Image: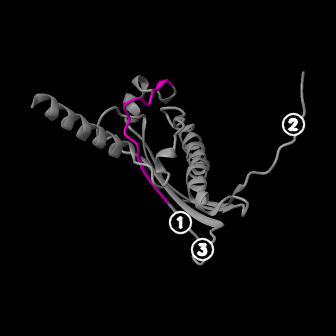
Amino acid sequence: MTSIVLMRISSLQLKHLLFTRVFVEPEVPFQEASSFKAGEFSFEGVTFHVNLNTAAVQGQENDPRDFMIELNVGITNEKNVHAPYKIDIGVLGLFEISEKIEKDERVNIVTVNGASLLYGAIREQVSTITSRSYLGTMVLPTMDFRDHIQGNQTIEEKAEKKAEKKAVEEKILNN
């Protein structure tokens, strides 16, 4: 049974997107490609370099409605597990958020959802470029940008705090 559902426009709108840098290179030379297929690859253990910056458009600091997001994603294959391709891609997005959203919530909503939209564009670009390569199409895994909410600690900061807490607990138990 098919049902008709009316959709509503999101309170966050992507107004403009542009790529600032696109670099995609196979990890292995053509001669070694038969043993390395992108479609069969798991990203478990691959190191992603992510740089995410969100800022209100100048002049809107008191009541921000327009935001610029810069997202850079890289896989350099310097350590751990190597992905089929090295990538370095940068994208800029201009976003507009509804005035109905509380002012103090806007930057976090824009950061998490805006970065997710931009990352989707990066995933599409990588898939399109790699679909013509001898290693085959690489589809980047989906990402969770909630660690970038203002006031949240990064995964590294949480791990550091946890290690500090454990060290203090061990010190207390050993004395």
Asked whether disc 2 touches disc 1, contact meaning CB atoms under 8 Å apart, the reply is no
Q: Which residue is mark 1?
A: 55
Q: Position of residue 35 (x, y in %)?
A: 40, 23
Cα–Cα gap, marks 2 and 1: 35 Å
Given the image, on which type of amino acid does mark 1 rest? Ala
Cα–Cα gap, marks 3 and 2: 37 Å
Q: Where is 10 relative to 94, above or below?
A: above
Could you say whether the residue bearing mark 3 is in a helix, strand or loop?
A: loop
Q: Where is 120 relative to 97, above or below?
A: above
Q: Position of residue 51 (x, y in %)?
A: 43, 54
Q: Residue furthest bottom?
A: 59
Protein image colouring: one colour
Q: Position of residue 169 (x, y in %)?
A: 21, 33
Given the image, on which type of amino acid does mark 3 rest? Asn
Labels 3 and 2: the sequence-earlier one: 2
Q: Residue 20: in sight, yes or no?
A: no
Q: What residue span does the magenta drawing correspond to?
A: 40-53
Whether the magenta-drawn stretch holds residue 136 is answered as no
Asked whether disc 3 touches disc 1, contact meaning CB atoms under 8 Å apart, the reply is no
Q: Which residue is mark 2?
A: 5
